[in-house]
Image (cartoon, helix red, strand yellow):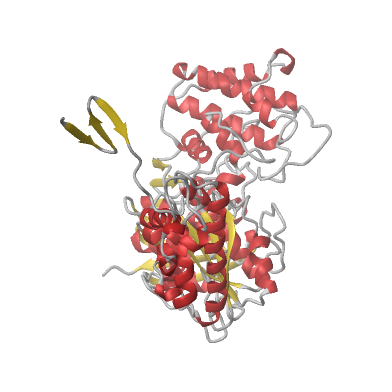
């Protein structure tokens, strides 16, 4: 008789005989070798990890005793055992929710007691110390925001998970972070955020959240020492990158280090030695009657009322033929410069401003009668004859009346559909005329961060054409200024960067949406699209970006506009760079003069304070 052996079976006499592998039950093991008995007799150190887990499990499953089950779990998760989840355990055959909860709860309990008992002795000196405390975040499959609360010696008081899920400034409220800090009498905090993707580089949302939390910390008087991003491929420290170092120790000695220099140890002096001058009159190009003028815009930081002062200084201090306006804004400075310089360079990264520059300053062909005729036809449109459209559905009854919005949306759609029948210049001129015309009637304080709630809005839309400005030679860009600085050369570079946290792309989002006409999904009460064109000059990295720009731009003279909005009631209106920092950075390039002028600025929010001044820094660049 021949038999053939297969796994768990024999073929014998033509019949398959199945057998079950013998598996010893825990009760069949001699008592001295059972985990519980060995623990009681010899203590926990005499047991392996799987033996300890077997005691916790209590019993095995069908076909597998408790020791084998424990060994399987330990082998499967290895060094990651302390980060095990209920879902992970339930993937093991025979492990139900009750056993999974039992194991995870035990691990969490031990970790909690360990952290609380060890925290007194943990001193956070640098980012490496932080990462050692939050080592488990790297392998998390979801995004976590963790806060470390420190005392005045930088000793860890408590580690707490603030949120789980996508990091978003609308979801992470400062109260969740600073309420425990107050209860714990914490001197400072450090925040840690993980990127499950493995990429430690900060996203735009990260930057926005960091800035928001830092501002809240400033108000609360609790220093935000650092914000770290950790991932499998490395880490990113906002503190370290802004200090231009790779490994930096945090300052303790009873006073915490500051994030982005927002938390000043001493109140800074905002004044700076400056000269005054006698102003001359400089002509702003006037347009024809019933036509739109370039400076007829409500715009944060617009310089139309400072033109005489700015150019009186430039004429006295600077020489050359090429004028670069690298943060052109309304473009009014370039409009005056066009009368005094042969070559003009304009730049701004807003889509609406780029179209406006092309309309007013561009060199393409256009037919005045054609433009006037088209606009006349637009003004004869009746809202009653129109259906609702993207613009009226979103902005009607809010930023504009319902009827005006229907006409505005219809006009913009008509311009786009008939683009092939227009020259490039005519296309830009019609859009620019529309932008200026809606700005005249917008139900806002001058920007589009909010609108007035009114029961009734006037149907007062009327479109007027623009009248272009003559230039000898003009170059128009829509680029990040710091990137453009590496490509251009000018005699005079006029630099008028954003001053505070208010992003221009968000303040003028309605104009941006109307210009691009890509009909994006809009969010929030203000109906803003997803963020784009966010300027670093509106963040706490402004000083570093300004220093980079000054270093890279090729010009004989640098003329920098800035004001002294440091004591604003609104934290978002406070300037990001001190006057002293600007002067110090410019002096590295050459001899620098500073001029000042009292000026009632354009107030679109809660930004009033006494003694408001505008400053103009003029640097004659020293070439090596």
Q: Residue furthest top?
A: 385
Q: Residue at x 40, y 74 (%)?
A: 46
Residues 65 and 524: in front is: 65
Where is the C terminus found, in terms of image quarters? bottom left
Residues 451 and 314: in front is: 451
Q: Which residue is drawn at 57% across and 21% down?
A: 413
Residues 523 and 137: in front is: 137
Q: Residue furthest left?
A: 2
Where is the N terminus found, in terms of image quarters? top left
Splitting the image into 4 quarters, where does residue 563 fall?
Answer: bottom right
Q: Residue at x 49, y 67 (%)?
A: 36
Q: Residue furthest front?
A: 1
Q: Where is residue 530 in the image (x, y as percent from the top left)?
A: 55, 40
Splitting the image into 4 quarters, where does residue 116 fall?
Answer: bottom right
Label count reads: 0
Residues 69 and 615: in front is: 69
Asked if residue 323 shows in the view, the reply is yes
Q: Residue furthest bottom?
A: 253
Q: Is residue 166 left or right of residue 525?
A: left
From the viewer's perspective, is residue 124 above or below residue 239? Answer: below
Q: Where is residue 67 in the image (x, y as percent from the top left)?
A: 42, 58
Q: Where is residue 587 in the image (x, y as percent from the top left)?
A: 41, 73
Asked if residue 466 shows in the view, the reply is no
Q: Where is residue 404 in the image (x, y as percent from the top left)?
A: 71, 26
Splitting the image into 4 quarters, where does residue 264 fall?
Answer: bottom right
Q: In this view, does 549 lie to the left or right of 286?
A: left
């Amino acid at each position: 008789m021949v038999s053939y052996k297969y796994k768990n079976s024999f073929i014998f006499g033509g019949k398959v005989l199945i057998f079950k592998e013998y598996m010893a039950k825990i009760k069949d093991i001699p008592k001295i070798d059972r985990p519980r008995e060995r623990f009681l007799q010899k203590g926990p150190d005499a047991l392996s990890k799987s033996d300890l887990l077997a005691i916790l499990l209590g019993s095995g499953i069908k076909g597998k005793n408790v020791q084998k089950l424990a060994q399987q779990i330990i082998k499967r998760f290895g060094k990651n055992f302390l980060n095990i989840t209920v879902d992970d355990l339930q993937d093991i055959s025979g492990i139900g929710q009750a056993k999974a909860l039992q194991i995870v709860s035990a691990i969490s309990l031990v970790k909690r007691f360990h952290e609380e008992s060890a925290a007194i002795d943990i001193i956070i000196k640098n980012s490496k110390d932080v990462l050692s405390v939050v080592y488990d975040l790297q392998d998390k499959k979801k995004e976590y925001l963790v806060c470390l609360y420190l005392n005045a010696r930088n000793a860890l008081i408590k580690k707490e998970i603030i949120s789980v899920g996508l990091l978003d400034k609308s979801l992470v409220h400062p109260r969740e972070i600073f309420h425990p800090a107050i209860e714990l009498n914490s001197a400072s905090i450090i925040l840690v955020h993980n990127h499950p993707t493995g990429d430690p580089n900060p996203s735009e949302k990260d930057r926005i959240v960091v800035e928001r939390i830092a501002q809240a910390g400033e108000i609360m008087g609790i220093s935000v020492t650092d914000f770290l991003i950790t991932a499998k491929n490395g880490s990113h420290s906002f503190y370290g990158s802004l200090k231009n170092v790779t490994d930096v120790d945090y300052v303790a000695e009873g006073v915490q280090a500051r994030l982005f220099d927002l938390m000043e140890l001493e109140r800074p002096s905002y004044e700076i030695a400056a000269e005054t001058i006698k102003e001359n009159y400089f002509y702003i190009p006037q347009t024809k009657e019933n036509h739109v003028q370039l400076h007829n815009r409500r715009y944060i930081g617009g310089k139309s009322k400072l033109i005489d002062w700015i150019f009186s200084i430039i004429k006295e201090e600077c020489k050359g033929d090429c004028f670069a306006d690298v943060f052109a804004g309304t473009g009014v400075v370039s409009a005056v410069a066009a009368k005094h310089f042969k070559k003009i360079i304009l730049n701004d990264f807003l889509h609406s401003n780029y179209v406006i520059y092309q309309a007013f300053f561009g060199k393409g062909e256009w037919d005045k009668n054609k433009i006037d005729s088209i606009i006349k036809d637009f003004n004869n449109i009746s809202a009653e004859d129109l259906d609702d459209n993207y613009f009226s559905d979103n902005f009607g009854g809010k930023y504009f009346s319902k009827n005006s919005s229907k006409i505005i949306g219809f006009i913009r759609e008509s311009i786009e559909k008939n683009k092939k029948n227009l020259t490039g210049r005519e296309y830009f001129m019609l859009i620019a005329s529309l932008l200026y015309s809606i700005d005249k009637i917008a139900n806002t304080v001058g920007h589009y961060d909010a609108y007035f709630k009114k029961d009734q809005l006037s149907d007062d839309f009327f479109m007027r054409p623009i009248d272009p400005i003559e230039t000898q030679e003009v170059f128009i860009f829509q680029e990040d200024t710091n990137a453009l600085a590496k490509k251009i050369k000018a005699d005079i570079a006029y630099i008028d960067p954003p001053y505070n946290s208010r992003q221009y792309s968000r303040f003028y989002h309605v104009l941006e949406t109307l210009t691009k006409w890509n009909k994006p999904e809009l969010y929030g009460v203000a109906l803003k699209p997803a963020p784009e064109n966010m300027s670093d000059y509106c963040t706490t990295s402004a000083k570093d970006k300004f220093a980079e720009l000054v270093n890279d731009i090729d010009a004989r003279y640098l003329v920098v506009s800035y004001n002294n909005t440091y004591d604003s009631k609104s934290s978002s209106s406070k300037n990001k760079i001190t006057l002293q920092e600007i002067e110090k950075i410019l002096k590295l390039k050459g001899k620098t003069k500073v001029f000042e002028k009292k000026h009632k600025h354009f107030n679109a929010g809660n930004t009033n304070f006494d003694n408001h001044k505008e400053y103009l820094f003029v640097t004659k660049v020293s070439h090596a």
